[in-house]
């Protein structure tokens, strides 16, 4: 079954305590991305990766790090979380078919983070 | 001005009607356009992808793209109560994606 998994699904932490949210996909997709969703602000892209070892900033990268050492995994790292990073986080992966230019995309189930 | 604007909701239509959702974008370099459906408490689900001018149909869904007017729309024919959700428009330029705030659709039986 094609899927994107995220762990943990729920996390309560305190300011300054480093955390990692994992994201894994089993579809051999080249492209992966992280988003945060906040009421009134919609879905905003944090970082994306076009392929292994290639990452780039989205609209709201401050306070986040990512790495893409292997195709299936794209962890999101918060080195020193702050309360304004309390949010719902989604990981997604996609594949663009070069011949047809069609794109398929899957989102993970989300990680709800509360930073106290 | 926000880069991707969606018509403000909420939008309510009776069952069986056509629901029309609209989206405008500011970056003329945008290459790919997406419509997602997001049920309350769930993750977004891609329902339509379009990259060339004109219409693209998939079942009851039709996406329309007009790059000259920087406008993309989603029509849902024969709306069903199960279509009640928030619909997100997004544009993508290379790897960077920008989303609209979403339009909440309610289909009343």
Image (spheres, grey):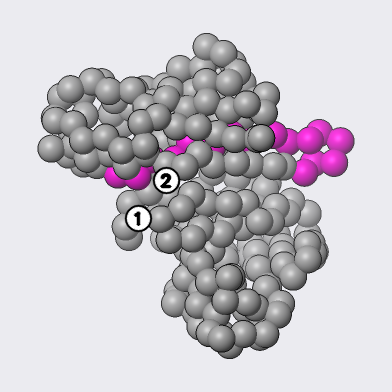
Crowding around mark 2 (Cα neighbors within 10 Å: few <14, some 14 to 19, many 20+) is many
In-front residue for pair A40/B1: A40
Give the magenta-colored segment's residue range.
Answer: A87-102
- Can you tell which quarter of the image residue B13 is in? bottom right
CA–CA distance in space, label 1 to label 2: 8 Å
Residue farthest toward the right in the current orientation of the protein: A99
Tag 2 subunit: A
Q: For numbered disc 1, what is the local secondary structure?
A: loop
Q: Are marks 1 and 2 in contact (CB under 8 Å)?
A: yes
Rendered view: A35 above or below A31: below
Q: For numbered disc 2, what is the local secondary structure?
A: strand
Residue behind mark 1: A41
**Image location (x, y in percent) of residue A108:** 50, 39
In-front residue for pair A86/B15: B15
Crowding around mark 1 (Cα neighbors within 10 Å: few <14, some 14 to 19, many 20+) is few
User: Residue B24: within the magenta?
Assistant: no
- Can you tell which quarter of the image residue B2 is in? bottom left
Rendered view: B21 above or below B47: below
**Image location (x, y in percent) of residue A92:** 54, 37
Rendered view: A62 above or below B31: above
In-front residue for pair A30/B96: A30
B27 sits to left or right of A44:
right
Residue behind mark 2: A44
B12 sits to left or right of B34:
left
Q: Give me the residue at 53% from left, 84% from top.
A: B108
Q: Give me the residue at 58% from left, 28% from top.
A: A25
The quadrant the N terminus of chain A occupies is top right
B44 sits to left or right of B46:
left
Residue A55 visible in image: no
The quadrant the C terminus of chain A occupies is top left
């Amino acid at each position: 079954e094609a899927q994107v998994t995220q762990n943990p699904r729920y996390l309560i932490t305190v300011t300054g305590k480093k955390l990692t949210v994992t994201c894994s996909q089993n579809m051999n997709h080249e492209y992966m991305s992280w988003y945060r969703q906040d009421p009134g602000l919609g879905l905003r892209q944090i970082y994306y990766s076009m392929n292994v070892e290639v990452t780039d900033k989205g609209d709201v990268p401050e306070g986040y790090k990512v790495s893409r050492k292997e195709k299936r995994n794209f962890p999101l790292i918060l080195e020193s979380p702050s309360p304004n990073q309390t949010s719902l986080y989604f990981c997604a992966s996609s594949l663009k078919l070069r011949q047809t230019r069609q794109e398929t995309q899957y989102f993970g189930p989300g990680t709800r983070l509360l930073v106290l | 001005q926000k880069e991707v604007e969606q018509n403000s909701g909420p939008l309510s239509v009776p069952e069986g009607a056509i629901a029309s959702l609209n989206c405008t974008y500011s970056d003329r370099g945008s290459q790919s356009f997406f419509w997602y459906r997001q049920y309350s408490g769930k993750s977004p689900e891609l329902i339509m992808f379009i990259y060339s001018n004109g219409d693209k149909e998939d079942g009851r869904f039709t996406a329309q793209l007009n790059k000259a007017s920087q406008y993309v729309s989603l029509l849902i024919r024969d709306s069903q109560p199960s279509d009640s959700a928030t619909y997100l428009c997004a544009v993508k330029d290379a790897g960077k994606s920008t989303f609209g705030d979403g339009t909440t659709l309610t289909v009343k039986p």
